Amino acid sequence: MKKLLGIIVLGLFLSTTAISEEILIKCSYDDGNINYIVDTKKKTWMTTSQTKPRKAYIDDKIFLKTWAYSSKKKEMHTDCIGGECTIGYEQLDRTTGKYSKLIIETTKAKVKEFNDNNSFKNIDELRLAMKEYIRRNAYGKYILTFYTAECEKTKKAF
């Protein structure tokens, strides 16, 4: 009986490990390198220096991480300092290895307008719409951060 229980526990442990696929990604940009761990099954993304992964949108073409959103309400946050809000995204194109990060400053009124004019069935729809909104509204003084990098999949543990 103990052997059977041991086999079941070991089988569950191994199958849980096999279900999750972690991809190690090394990105090079002007100021140095940054390394990411993307888990395609759990749909999470984090840098190797972070201890807690963040949820991400993952499909056959991109890894996309957005911030300043509520997964429960399926909307952008309106918790802003004063009237100014900071929203952004990071994206990795899985076919070309191009990484881009864009953070913009917008107003609380524009975030409210975005939320009022959109309704989303799920969090993935929200993430994709936020990315397009940020990309379309990124101009002039509103861009806080923008950079790109070249990335590659690696087998090396960081």
Image (spheres, rainbow, N blue to C red):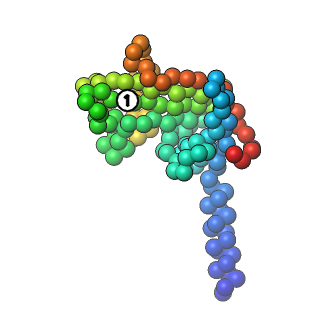
Residue at 56% over, 35% down: 63
Q: Write down the residue under mark 1.
A: 86
Rendered image quadrant of residue 128: top left
> Residue placed farthest to the bottom in the image?
1
Classify the position of the N terminus by image quarter. Answer: bottom right
* Figure disc tally: 1
Give left or right: position of 78 versus 93. Answer: left
Q: Position of residue 73 (x, y in %)?
A: 31, 43
Rendered image quadrant of residue 96: top right
The crowding category of the residue bearing disc 1, from other C-alpha atoms within 10 Å (few below 14, some 14 to 19, many at least 20), is many
Q: As rendered, which of 95 and 156 lies closer to the eye?
A: 156
Q: As rendered, which of 12 and 54 lies closer to the eye?
A: 54
72 up-or-down from 94: above or below:
below
Q: Position of residue 87 (x, y in %)?
A: 39, 30
Q: Is residue 113 visible?
A: no
The three-letter code of the residue at mark 1 reads Thr
Rendered image quadrant of residue 10: bottom right
> Residue placed farthest to the front in the image?
31
Classify the position of the C terminus by image quarter. Answer: top right
43 up-or-down from 118: above or below:
below
Identify the secondary structure beneath mark 1: strand
Q: Is residue 156 visible?
A: yes
> Residue placed farthest to the top in the image?
140
Residue at 48% over, 44% down: 55
Residue at 62% over, 61% down: 16
Q: Position of residue 11 (x, y in %)?
A: 67, 69
Residue at 61% over, 45% down: 48
Give left or right: position of 125 versus 147. Answer: left
Q: Position of residue 91 (x, y in %)?
A: 54, 30
